[in-house]
């Protein structure tokens, strides 16, 4: 009975951070997925390599807990992210549910994160592409809140804009919270991480 419960744990094998590849997009709200996987690679001391087969930057190694893990930053631009993700899942014969995708979400306020086991794209072009290429939406995702645009700022300008100095401090803290949530999910499964971390937030 214990063994059966262990096998049902959803432990990510591939963690994908979404963003856009050009330097002008560095540290923008839309690239917060890139920032988090960069932090994970640094923490786990695994190096990025450009991989043309995967159309992205790819890293492979072990986590602090000893889990075998793969990280991916698609270099296809956001709206074609699914090409890169599909290339990796096909090559390693990964199940859809073992892919954890990290991305920005305007519907969440800055300072909040939200883990889910599955769901729709919610208007996010990177997620639309991944769902289209995988043919399923039953894969876990970690959304990081970037807040809505103000009346003075259009949506595109908001997501492609950089955080203010005050916001940047909150971002660093929330990236730490998200990193903790991922480490916990690699040890205890995504579902338990959801119950523990979805209610937490960082105050600005």
Image (tube, rainbow, N blue to C red):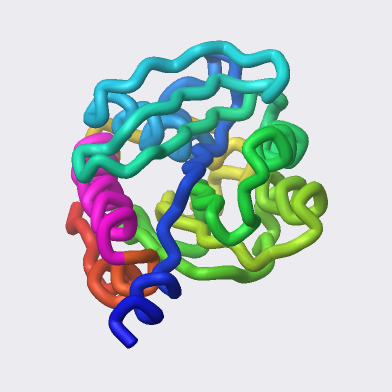
- Residue at 40% from the left image edge and 64% from the top image edge: 114
- Closer to the camera, 182 or 33? 182
Classify 61 as above or below 12.
Answer: above
Q: To which quarter of the image does residue 96 belong?
A: bottom right
* Magenta region: 168-188
Q: How many marks?
A: 0
- Residue at 56% from the left image edge and 38% from the top image edge: 18
> On the picture, is 48 further left or further right than 86?
left
In the image, is residue 169 part of the stretch drawn in magenta? yes
Classify 86 as above or below 140.
Answer: above
In the image, is residue 136 part of the stretch drawn in magenta? no
Name the spot of residue 104 as percent of width and height, x first: 50, 48
Name the spot of residue 47 as percent of width and height, x first: 37, 16
Classify 146 as above or below 190.
Answer: above
- Residue at 62% from the left image edge and 28% from the top image edge: 74
Res. 79 in view: no
> On the picture, is 177 further left or further right than 128?
left
Give the overall secondary structure of the magenta segment. Answer: helix
- Closer to the camera, 140 or 98? 98
- Residue at 80% from the left image edge and 58% from the top image edge: 135
């Amino acid at each position: 009975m214990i063994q059966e419960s262990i096998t049902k744990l959803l432990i990510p094998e591939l963690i994908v951070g979404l963003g856009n590849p050009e330097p002008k997009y560095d540290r923008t709200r839309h690239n917060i997925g890139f920032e988090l996987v960069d932090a994970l690679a640094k923490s786990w001391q695994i190096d990025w390599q450009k991989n043309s087969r995967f159309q992205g930057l790819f890293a492979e190694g072990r986590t602090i807990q000893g889990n075998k893990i793969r990280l991916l930053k698609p270099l296809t631009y956001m709206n074609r992210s699914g090409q890169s993700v599909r290339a990796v899942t096909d090559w390693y014969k990964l199940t859809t549910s073992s892919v954890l995708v990290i991305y920005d979400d305007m519907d969440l306020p800055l300072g909040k994160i939200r883990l889910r086991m599955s769901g729709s794209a919610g208007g996010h072009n990177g997620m639309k592409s991944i769902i289209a290429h995988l043919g399923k939406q039953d894969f876990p995702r970690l959304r990081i809140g970037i807040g809505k645009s103000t009346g003075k700022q259009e949506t595109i300008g908001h997501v492609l804009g950089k955080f203010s100095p005050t916001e940047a401090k909150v971002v660093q803290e929330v990236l730490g919270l998200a990193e903790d949530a991922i480490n916990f999910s690699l040890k205890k499964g995504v579902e338990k991480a959801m119950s523990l971390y979805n209610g937490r937030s960082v105050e600005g």
